[in-house]
Amino acid sequence: MPATTLPRPDRFLLAGVMGWPVMHSRSPTLHNYWFAHYGLTGTYVPLAIAPDRLRAALRALPALGFSGCNLTIPHKQAALAIVDRLDPLAQRMGAVNCIAVASDGSLEGYNFDAFGFIESVREAQPGWRAGSGAAVLIGAGGAARAVLVGLLEQGAREIRLINRTRARATALAGATGGPVSVFAWEERNAALAGAATLVNATSLGMSGEPGLDISLEKLPQNALVCDIVYVPRETGLLKEARLRGNPTVNGLGMLLHQARPAFHAWFGVMPSVSPELRALVESTL
Ligand SMILES: NC(=O)c1ccc[n+]([C@@H]2O[C@H](COP(=O)([O-])OP(=O)(O)OC[C@H]3O[C@@H](n4cnc5c(N)ncnc54)[C@H](OP(=O)(O)O)[C@@H]3O)[C@@H](O)[C@H]2O)c1
């Protein structure tokens, strides 16, 4: 995490999110709430940046007085080769979701998605420990990689990784290393036996997508069930888990919490996620 730099009241604080497209992003709602909440003068804007302009746009940040920006699809990987310094966690995640402009104008690349996932789980289940039992992780895309790195960083001792396209899971396990075993898609029901945590990190269950077809029969009733999907708030998986007594966490907390260290990196204030902010973002979904 970058060193704290106190905001200077003589400066209009600037940050934004670069994406293509970008107008769907909830990040402006979040960060502009925090500007107002903490009495800081500044703004956070959506920046529609085509892929071939990413380098020029990032290099323009210091000259424009931006403290940094977030990156969303399709820029998270391309930025790896553009930043001047890369945080080891961003390297492990193979993607950059936050850039901070250093005092000398150089660009530092971070990724706070793993932090966001872990914090969202801790917020909902303060007693949860990554190392307390096996975790089953479904998915092998960008979000799954962030969750996997988060679990590993928190000391997970056994992760069962399952993806429809098995080769992608094998490649992901190879890239991160650690105690990760790859299971076949057909083994997903059986792989739940004895697990302490289940995470859906696929897009299945999202509005407009089919649900995740899985039987929870073998999952212990005290296992934590997480879905990184946040539209709808309660996916079919979470509903089924809740009805059989499992504690559950949806994906909204991950979205909210990944923004906190970004705001801190830019403006020196570590903001908190209040019920009011949660309700505000939920009202935009
Ligand atoms: N809460 C948050 O803050 C947060 C952050 C990031 C993303 N997300 C959400 O996470 C989800 C995944 O995002 P991503 O960036 O990781 O996407 P991605 O890189 O495209 O990966 C998509 C994943 O879903 C799987 N999948 C898609 N359709 C499937 C199907 N019909 N059957 C089985 N598996 C299927 C893919 O499996 P294959 O490899 O076999 O295609 C892959 O594992 C999205 O819903 C996104 O909104 C949430």
Image (cartoon, rainbow, N blue to C red):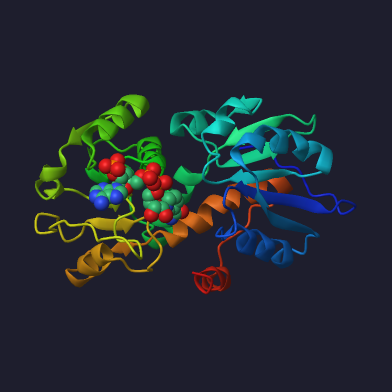
Q: Is residue 90 above or below residue 265?
A: above
Quadrant the N terminus occupies: top right
Left or right: where 39 falls relative to 23: right
Q: Residue at x 9, y 59 (%)?
A: 217
In this figure, what is the number of numbered marks? 0
Q: x, y (%) of residue 10? A: 90, 52
**Identity of the residue furthest to the right in this view:** 10
Q: Is residue 209 above or below residue 117?
A: below
Q: Residue at x 63, y 57 (%)?
A: 271
Q: Residue at x 11, y 48 (%)?
A: 193
Residue 208 can be seen in this image = yes
Q: Residue at x 16, y 61 (%)?
A: 221
Q: x, y (%) of residue 263? A: 65, 50
Left or right: where 116 falls relative to 219: right
Residue 139 can be seen in this image = no
Image-quadrant location for residue 105: top right
Image-quadrant location for residue 120: bottom left
Left or right: where 264 falls relative to 208: right
Q: x, y (%) of residue 153? A: 40, 36
Left or right: where 132 falls relative to 270: left
Q: Is residue 75 above or below residue 277?
A: above
Q: x, y (%) of residue 172? A: 32, 31
